[in-house]
Image (cartoon, rainbow, N blue to C red):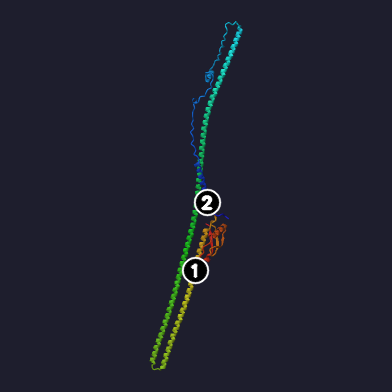
Amino acid sequence: MKEFNKPPFQQKAIAIGFTVGVHVVALVGLLFLGMSKPPEPPKQIKTVLIKPEDLKPVTREETPFEETAHQNIAEEITQEAEPSVEPAPAIPTPAALPPVDHSKAEAQKAAAAAKAQERAEQKAAEQANRAEKQRQATEAAQAKAQADAKAAAQAKAEASKADAKAQQAAAAKAEAARQKAEQAAAEAKAAQQKANALKKAEQLEKQKSLNAKAAADAKAKADAQAKAAEAKRKAEADAKAKAAHDAKVKADAAAKVNQDAKTKAAADAKAKADAQAKATEAKRKAEADAKAKAAHDAKAKAEADAKAKAAHDAKAKAAADAKAKADAEARERAAEEAKASSARKAAEEAATKKAESKRIASTAKRDFENKIRRAWDTPSGSSGKTATARIQLNDDGSVRSAVVNSSDPDMRASIEAAIRAAAPYPMPSDPEARQQARSLTSTFKAQ
C-alpha cells in the first residue's frame, strides 16, 4: 500500500527543531566571540640607527708600557725602516791594563757586538710579539663589542619580528574568528531564511488546503441549503395542494349536503303541497258532493267522509314514509361520505408522514456522507479515483457493516477507515426515518 501523507504536526516539529538548532549554534558562536579577549592592536616597529660613536667603549688591557696599544700598533704598522741596533754598552776598562792582543780584542768585541745585537733582536722580537698580542686582544675586544652590538641589534630585531609575527598571528586569528562568526551568522541567516521559506510554504499549503476545504464545505452547505430549500418548497407546494384538495373535498361534501338538503326540502315541500292540494281538493269535492248530495243518504255521506279521511291518512302516511326513507338515505350517504373523507384524510396523512420520514432519512444520509467526507484522509496520488460504499447501521448509529468497492486498495482502506472513524452517526428520532437511514449507498471521488 502507498504511504499516506504525513500529519502536518510532524512537519512542523521537524521545522521547529531545525530552526532551534540553528539559533543555538548562532548564540554559542556569538557568546564565544563576546567572551574572548579582543585582539591587541599591533605594536609599532621602530628602527633605531646606531652610530659607532654611540657604542660603549671597550676597556683596554693595561700594559706595563707607557704607549697605548693602538699607538704601538700604529707605529708597528707604519714602520718602514729596520729596527735600530742599540750600540753595545761601553765597558769600562782599567787604564793600567797591559796591552792585549788586538785580534783577540776584536774577536771579543765582535762577539760582544753579536751578543748585543742578538739581545736587541730578541728584545725587538719580544716587543713585536707583545704588540701583536695587544693588537689581537684589541681586535678581539672590538670584534666582541661588534658581535655584542650585532647580537643586541639582532635580538632586538628578532623581538620586533616576533612581536610583529605575534601581532600578525593575533590579527589573523581575529580575522579568522570574525570570518567564522560571519560565516556562522550567514549560515544561521540562510537556515533561518530557509526555515521561514519552509514555514511560509507550509502555511500557504495549509491555507490552500483550508481554502479548498472551506470552499468544499461552502459548496456542500450551499447544496444542502438548496436541497433543503427545494425540499421545503416542495413540502409547501404539497401542503398547499393538500390543503386545496381538502378544501375542495370539504366544499364538495358541503355542496352535496346542501344540495341533498335542498332536494329533500323541495321534495318535502312538494309532497306537503300536493297533500294539502289533494286535501283541499278532496274537501272541496266533498263539500261540493255534500252540497250537491245534501239530499243523499247520511250513510253515503258518512262513507264518503270516511273514504276521504282514509285517503287523507294514507297520503299522509305515504308522505311520512317517504320522508323517513329520504332521511335515512341522506344519513347513510353522509356516513359514507364521512367514512370516505376519513379514509382519504388518513391516506393523505400516511403519505405525508411517509414523505416526511423519507425527507428526514435523506437529510440524515446526507449528513452521514458529509461526516464521512470530513473524516476522510484522501490518499496521495488518488486524484480523480472513485469508490462506492454500501453501509449498514444499527439503531444507535454504530456501523453494522461497510462494503467499499474500488479498484484502488488505498481508496478502499481510507474510506473504510473514515466510515469507522465517523461513527457513531446521529440517527433520526422518527422510527420509520431511522429505519430508512440505517441503509445508505454513497459514491466518493478523490479531489
Instruction: Name the residue at 54% across, 24% down.
Output: 141
| Image: 167 above or below 282 | above
Mark toward the start of the polypeptide (2 vs 1): 2
Check disc 2 and report the residue beneath it.
13
Q: Nearer the viewer, residue 62 or 49?
A: 62
Question: Mark 2, mark 1: which one is toward the viewer?
Answer: 2
Instruction: Name the residue at 48% across, 73% down.
Output: 342
> Disc 2 marks which amino acid?
Ala
134 left or right of 258? right
| Image: 25 above or below 417 | above
Q: Which residue lies furthest to the left in this view?
A: 291
Q: Nearer the viewer, residue 288 or 196?
A: 196
Instruction: Name the residue at 49% across, 68% down.
Output: 353
Distance from Cα at disc 2 to Cα at disc 1:
55 Å
Place of residue 51 in the rendered image (x, y in percent of width and height, measured from the top left) = 49, 26
> Disc 1 marks which amino acid?
Lys
| Image: 181 above or below 401 | above
Q: Nearer the viewer, residue 152 or 238?
A: 152
Q: How many labels does the image show?
A: 2
Q: Are marks 2 and 1 in contact (CB under 8 Å)?
A: no
Q: Which of 380 and 134 is in front in this view?
A: 134
Place of residue 366 in the rendered image (x, y in percent of width and height, measured from the top left) = 51, 62
Res. 283 mark = none
Q: Assign a secondary structure to mark 2.
A: helix
Place of residue 319 in the rendered image (x, y in percent of width and height, measured from the top left) = 44, 84
Place of residue 262 in the rendered image (x, y in percent of width and height, measured from the top left) = 42, 78
Quarter of image, res 143: top right
Check disc 1 and report the residue beneath it.
353
108 left or right of 260? right
